[in-house]
Image (spheres, coloured by chain):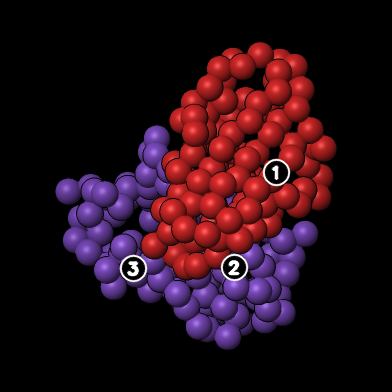
Chain colours: A purple, B red
Amino acid sequence: QVQLRESGPELVKASETLSLTCDVSGYSMTSGSYWVWIRQPPGKGLEWIGNIYHTGSTYYNPSLRGRVTISADTSKNQFSLNLNSAAAADTAVYYCAKEGAVAGNWVDPWGQGILVTVSS
Amino acid sequence: DIQMTQSPSSLSASVGDRVTITCRASQSIADSLNWYQQKPGKAPRLLIYSASSLQNGVPSRFSGGGSGTDFTLTINSLRPDDFAIYHCQQTHSPPFTFGPGTKVDI
């Protein structure tokens, strides 16, 4: 079955770039589907960051004001998140996950999540 | 963006109870509504998609309903394993926003 796993620095300095990678196994990204990043600040709700289709097209949450980039490397079967100008408010558990083959599908499955702390 | 609200924000229940959680969208989203269960320290798990379709492997005591702007998640005969936070999500228009969550505890 499809499995996802996030990796990257768990501590990022304020104003620097938060960078995470999601390794996908059990499914070839080139087979289709949307791939998504979602985050959850400690003790708070879930925020949808953005997604990427296997062709490379992306959609980002406007609330992140142009700071976010999602890219994919299908040769490695992975996709990545870059969030520029990190601030304390970006401290959160970051999840990568699979959406469906059609835009507007549900999120399943999810990675285990990685807690990223932005410190000054 | 479409805003999602949930009620109640938390509730206390007992094993065997029937529990209903409500999710409301700020505009019509047809049936593009999903429900997730999240336990402490774990990633969310998909329970219901397209408002009322049960995800494979999810117990039949979970059910979803509604369309347009008002949706419900019902848990019949609550079990100890069901104490968790429940999130709704709209996937009608990006960004695909989530509700604030409902905590179900003993």
> What amino acid does circle 3 point to?
Pro
Q: Position of residue B65 (x, y in %)?
A: 69, 45
Q: Are marks 3 and 2 in contact (CB under 8 Å)?
A: no
> Is residue B73 or residue A102 the one in the foreground?
B73
Q: Are marks 1 and 3 in contact (CB under 8 Å)?
A: no
Q: Which residue is mark 2?
A: A104
Name which residue lies at 44% across and 54% down: B26
Please identify, in this view, whether the residue under mark 1 or under mark 3 is nearer the observer: 1
Task: Assess disc 2: are there few (<14), some (14-19) or many (≥20) residues with their C-alpha within 10 Å of its C-alpha.
Answer: some
Q: Does residue A75 sit above or below A66 in this rendering?
A: below
State the CA–CA distance, disc 1 to disc 2. Answer: 18 Å
| Sooner in the amino-acid sequence: mark 3 or mark 2 | 3
Please identify, in this view, whether the residue under mark 1 or under mark 2 is nearer the observer: 1
Residue B64's disc number: 1
> What amino acid does circle 1 point to?
Gly
Side of A63 relative to B68 (left or right): left
- Protein chain holding label 3: A
Task: Assess disc 1: are there few (<14), some (14-19) or many (≥20) residues with their C-alpha within 10 Å of its C-alpha.
Answer: many
State the CA–CA distance, disc 3 to disc 2. Answer: 17 Å
Name which residue lies at 49% across and 52% down: B25
Q: Does residue B52 sit above or below B1 in this rendering?
A: above
Side of A31 relative to B98 (left or right): right
Q: Position of residue B32 (x, y in %)?
A: 61, 60
Q: Are marks 1 and 3 on the same chain?
A: no
Task: Assess disc 3: are there few (<14), some (14-19) or many (≥20) residues with their C-alpha within 10 Å of its C-alpha.
Answer: some
Q: Which residue is mark 3?
A: A62
> What amino acid does circle 2 point to?
Gly
